[in-house]
Image (cartoon, rainbow, N blue to C red):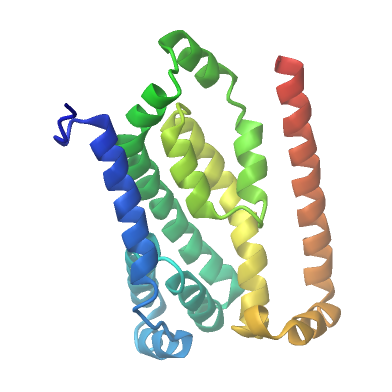
Amino acid sequence: MVSFSFQNKTFKFLSLLAVLFLFIILGRYFNFDPEYYRNALSKFPVVLSGLIFVFLYVLTTTFIWMGPKDAFRVAGAVLFGPYISTVFVWIGEILNAAILFFLSRNLGQEFVQEKFKIKTGNIDKVKKESSALSVLALRLNPLVPFRFLDLGYGLSRVSFRKYFIVIVIASLPRIFWLQYILSGVGMNVFKDIPAVMDYFGKNFFLIKYSGLYFLGVAILSLAAVIVKKVKK
């Protein structure tokens, strides 16, 4: 008979799934208006509004999925501009990563280890061979959601120290790329493709940065695959 105490690995993993499901459901019941938050934050000095922004960003985007991240990123980009908003969002995403990583590790890692019968010797090998280059390539890739990475690596045996160092470096160029676009087109980035293309066409810096950014992502991704095959 299975005992569902909080020490039970299956119970903790089911608790993790329930929490994540709750995060998704909450996003359907809250409406986040970028203009409202921009107006509210504009009443304070930059430093104070920045602190409030980071606090609200972490509070909402960590625990409420599907909605607040887009609203706060747009509000921050329009209010603070691409450079300062990048710093605030970057700080928020670093804090988000720590919260989700440890939530996943504490509630789900033991279950995954037991379910897939991962032995201690294999764990040490995985920890040794886990390439920071792979984490870097995934973190830079705009098609891979930050949350999935934070939760996924929390379930793995990759150390938080290694993961943290990489995401501190890799998150910045990706966040800046999107904040720069949002500062010019706002919410139209999600619903008005012609407006986005027009903004790109008139902004040579953005075209050049985007080209270098995606070239870097492609090179790092290829390098990560090659390194992995060489290690095998």
| Residue 91 position in % (x across, y down) | 44, 57
Task: Classify residue 210 by image quadrant.
Answer: bottom right
Say whether residue 51 is visible: no
| Residue 44 position in % (x across, y down) | 34, 84
Tell me how many marks there are.
Answer: 0
Q: Is residue 135 left or right of residue 227?
A: left
In this view, the residue in front, 14 or 50, is: 14
Q: Quadrant of the N terminus?
A: top left
Q: Is residue 60 left or right of residue 162?
A: left
| Residue 162 position in % (x across, y down) | 50, 31
Q: Is 34 placed above or below 114 here? A: below
Furthest residue toward top: 121
Name the residue at 52% across, 70% down: 85
Q: Is 73 placed above or below 213 here? A: below
Furthest residue toward front: 1
Q: Is 42 placed above or below 146 here? A: below
Q: Quadrant of the C terminus?
A: top right
Task: Classify residue 194 by image quadrant.
Answer: bottom right
Say whether residue 121 is visible: yes
Q: Is residue 59 left or right of residue 119?
A: left
Name the residue at 80% across, 41% down: 219
Name the residue at 81% across, 85% down: 198
| Residue 226 position in % (x across, y down) | 78, 27
In this view, the residue in front, 193 or 54, is: 193
Q: Is 229 placed above or below 5 here? A: above
